Amino acid sequence: MARNIQSLERAAAMLRLLAGGERRLGLSEIASALDLAKGTAHGILRTLQAEGFVEQDPASGRYQLGAELLRLGNSYLDVHELRARALVWTDDLARSSGESVHLGVLHQQGVLIVHHVFRPDDSRQVLEVGAMQPLHSTALGKVLSAYDPVAHNEAVEVEREAFTARTVTDPDGFEGILDLTRARDAADVEETWEGIASVAAPIHDRRRMPVGASASPAPWSASARTGSCAPS
Amino acid sequence: MTDAHTAGPFIAAIDQGTTSSRCIVFDKDGRIVSVDQKEHEQIFPKPAWVEHDATEIWNNVQEVVAGAVAKAGITRDDIKAIGITNQRETTLLWDKNTGEPVHNAIVWQDTRTDALCRELARNVGKDRFRRETGLPLASYFAGPKARWLLDNVEGLRERAEAGDILFGTMDSWVIWNLTGGVNGGKHVTDVTNASRTMLMNLHKMEWDERICESIGVPKQMLPEIRSSAEVYGEVTGGQLGDLLGGIPVASALGDQQAALFGQTCFAEGEAKSTYGTGTFMLMNTGDKAINSYSGLLTTVGYQIGDQKPVYALEGSIAVTGSLVQWMRDQMGLINSAAEIETLASSVEDNGGAYFVPAFSGLFAPYWRSDARGVIAGLTRYVTKAHIARAVLEATAWQTREITDAMTKDSGVELAALKVDGGMTSNNLLMQTLSDFLDAPVVRPMVAETTCLGAAYAAGLAVGFWSSTDELRANWRRAAEWTPNMDAGTRDREYKSWLKAVERSMGWLDESGEE
């Protein structure tokens, strides 16, 4: 078995110690409990503190577990929470763009539509919440694949079907599209459905982690190609 | 949310609500240009008593109006009118010479007038004034609250009879102050707010002298009853006078009626339901004040200028969003309100469980104060996910009971239900609602229907919008859920729900007030 990294083992032991009975411990208590030199213990504590895993009480100088640990455990964003928070903004986006808005998250090998705001005209539209879209050809899927490494793996491993003549299926071409997505924005011009184009942008949490994507699909035709399609 | 597409002129709407005061500036398309909001203190002098400091509220209103106007980057010339919507029934008395409230406002939820209402019902029953006012004797309504103040604030009755005291719900207080206060402020209320005092005759739109006398409220302190959409006066004096002097104050609507207006429910049979902590459903019944035999309230929906008043039937559900909060805070089964959908979606159905959240009795259409909450149909098979599903279904079934009562009273079938409020982000709930009602459920693009309604009414009054047809054309559908449940399943489930409701009754030994 390969040797483990000693300082990581020591850091883990410190976190366990702080998670135990006493909630706050001083430097010398931590050092002696783990049989470490004070200088060594202090170096590790300072690093943990910088990462937010440990906090130091300014008055007593004692250490306790940091808020970051709690966030780590709760970092999964509920998709229904995402919808609740996005409601007002997506309504406004639909209203100002005159197009429908979809909100999607990675689910298995595709994009799950978790929220859908109708195009603000009087046409008959069907709610698409719960529908799945492909990762490799839709604007939503490209955004997720470009920013979320898990989505990227799924998109690379899945068999990329050619839905239209414009669908990019080869691995190099697909990676090129993701580079373009990261540099500019994501678009799908008749790569999934004939006559439909859409643009999409990533939704990040406050720590810049991608949690989903928002897209505005619109009818697309040769005569409309001169018109502008504003990204969200 | 300001963007380049929005150009003036605008309408500003003030929402003087239970927990906060807000001001929203709208453009001609009914889109939000800017928002400002400030919370005020909830004062609890005793259990079940709730008061607001009206001076604090007026200060906050001035602040949020100035704030919203500043955020929009506009001036008085860009604003064509100001409209008002407000928490209903909350009651204030103030001195017309000093402009000082004589006591904190008594908030609608406050139950201190329970005993007074029972006393007023003596011999005749809770429905003593229902034919004239559309309301049962209950602690919510403003008239008995005013009587309580006259009885309990020393020397107040004499001052009131001398004509020094003014009565008002929060619309009256805000309008009086906006239009100059002690310097000629207009002492008015609108028909919708007046219809919640228990002092107005619904059929004549006038204060009912006999009822005022029975309840013990001197007529001379009551405001003039006006329509919901007309110019009551102009912004005058004070901090806002400098900023917005001369702008017409042109609408007032109780919050639920404002939502009905904002949802453009202008035709008979159109209904809206607002899903928050509790739920309020109103159905437009046209020019007929329909007396309810099913425990609903008869109320004024709105009146535009000198047109005929439009009536509504109202049903409320005490516990809807608060049941989800209870699952989160008291049961700890979810971390956030939105997670109820995640949990509920992890199963196909309720597993046979039904949750009747009669936490403080059953409201419309039953009115049983001896009922308490039950979860019925438990077996070993039932998981927390089934309970989560039963929680959402409880809101949907209670809506169904109210729509059934409305249909029974009015003879009008519900064509579609327009929804708003925080719980409309719950997709499973909205689908369940559509399934149980067997009717489409639609959500509009503007979530702020209450403020929008006040803005619409004010805009109509000054000709900013030409007609209700124009407002209707502004309404945009953001989502629509259509029924997807076979009739057999729906009927079977409804029967089970009704059985569960029956199980909740008679839990308390002392009989209700009936």
Image (cartoon, grey):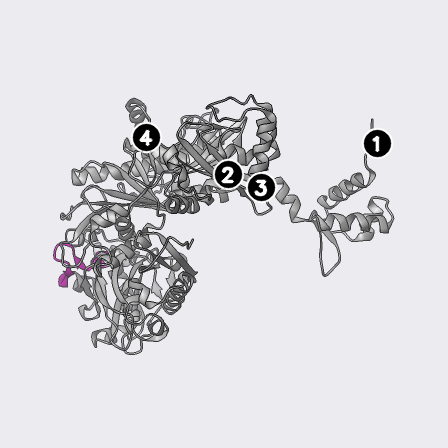
Mark positioned earlier in the residue sequence (1 or 3): 1
Label 4 SS: helix
Query: Can you tell which of label 1 and label 3 is closer to the viewer?
Result: 3
Q: What crowding class fits label 4: few (fewer than 14 Cα within 10 Å), some (14-19), or many (20 or more)?
A: many
Residue B303 position in % (x across, y down): 18, 55
Residue B21 in view of the camera? yes
Residue A136 position in % (x across, y down): 53, 28
Q: Give how far apart the Cα atoms at labels 1 and 3 are.
A: 41 Å
Label 1 SS: loop
Determine which residue is flagged by label 3: A183
Q: Give how far apart the Cα atoms at labels 3 and 4 are.
A: 45 Å
Determine which residue is flagged by label 2: A213
Q: Give how far apart the Cα atoms at labels 2 and 4 are.
A: 30 Å
| Circle 1 chain | A
Looking at the picture, does residue B313 appear above or below residue A147?
below
Q: Give how far apart the Cα atoms at labels 1 and 4 are.
A: 61 Å
Looking at the picture, does residue B317 appear above or below residue B206?
above
Q: Give how far apart the Cα atoms at labels 1 and 2 are.
A: 41 Å
Mark positioned earlier in the residue sequence (1 or 2): 1
Highlighted magenta segment, given as a residue range:
B194-210
Residue B42 in view of the camera? no
